[in-house]
Image (cartoon, rainbow, N blue to C red):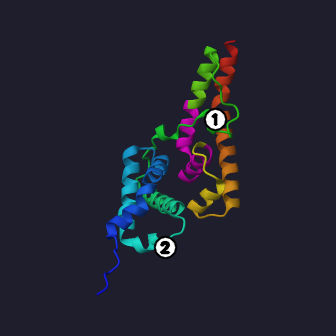
Amino acid sequence: MALLPFRQSKSKRFDRLVQPHLKTMFTFAYRLTGREHDAEDLVQDVVVKLYPRLEELESVDHLRPWLHRVLYRHFIDTIRKRPAGREINTSALDLHDEQTPFLETRVGSEQDPLTNVEGDIRSRTLKRLLGELHPDQRTLLLLHDADGWRQEDIAEVLDVPIGTIKSRLHRTRALLRTKLQEELEPFGEQLRGLQ
């Protein structure tokens, strides 16, 4: 009598596949939602929905981008169902100077008080304007410029051609740059008048 080959339980097989990706899924979800609790809920919802689809998960060649695509689509579905007027928490929208090539006018680390005030105004304005962007635009900008994702990876997750990613990224940067300049110009003149 031959022994049946050992087969892991369904839950162990699922954990083995999904567990290595939970941290990046949470980080991505946090970038999308702006709230830790909402990010946890989003990841949990996706994991619960994927559990019955174990065989499909096992057949996916590149699981990370596939999981992020599922997470993103679930987020978009959630946004569509959300009541209008619910604000986005901008704490997840923090950008570091070295990660924002689209914003060449960012202030360095000079100790000049006037420069520090101007930098603080820019930072708060940038966070607010990022929060006002359409979720698709904000997600694209944060994934690429803040988190350092390659355009090819973003195209795979969002399931759009690379050319679309390039043009959307260009348009979103231009829109944000224009809004930022419009918002900061009055402060720039006031601050220059203090010198």
Q: Of residues 136 and 155, which is closer to you in this image?
A: 155
Q: Earlier in the sequence, mark 2 or mark 1?
A: 2
Q: Which residues are magenta?
A: 124-145
Tell me the quadrant of the picture where the N terminus can be found: bottom left
The residue shown at (47%, 37%) is 91
| Residue sticking out furthest to the front | 1
Residue 134 among those drawn in magenta: yes
Q: Nearer the viewer, mark 2 or mark 1?
A: 2
Q: Which residue is mark 2?
A: 59
For residue 194, which quarter of the picture? top right
Q: Secondary structure at mark 2?
A: helix
- Disc sitting over residue 98 in the figure: 1
Which part of the image, by quadrant, shows the C terminus?
Answer: top right
Which three-letter amino acid code belongs to the residue tagged 2?
Answer: Ser
Residue nearer the viewer, 1 or 62: 1
Callout 2 touching callout 1 (CB < 8 Å): no
- Inspect this view and state whether residue 81 appears: no
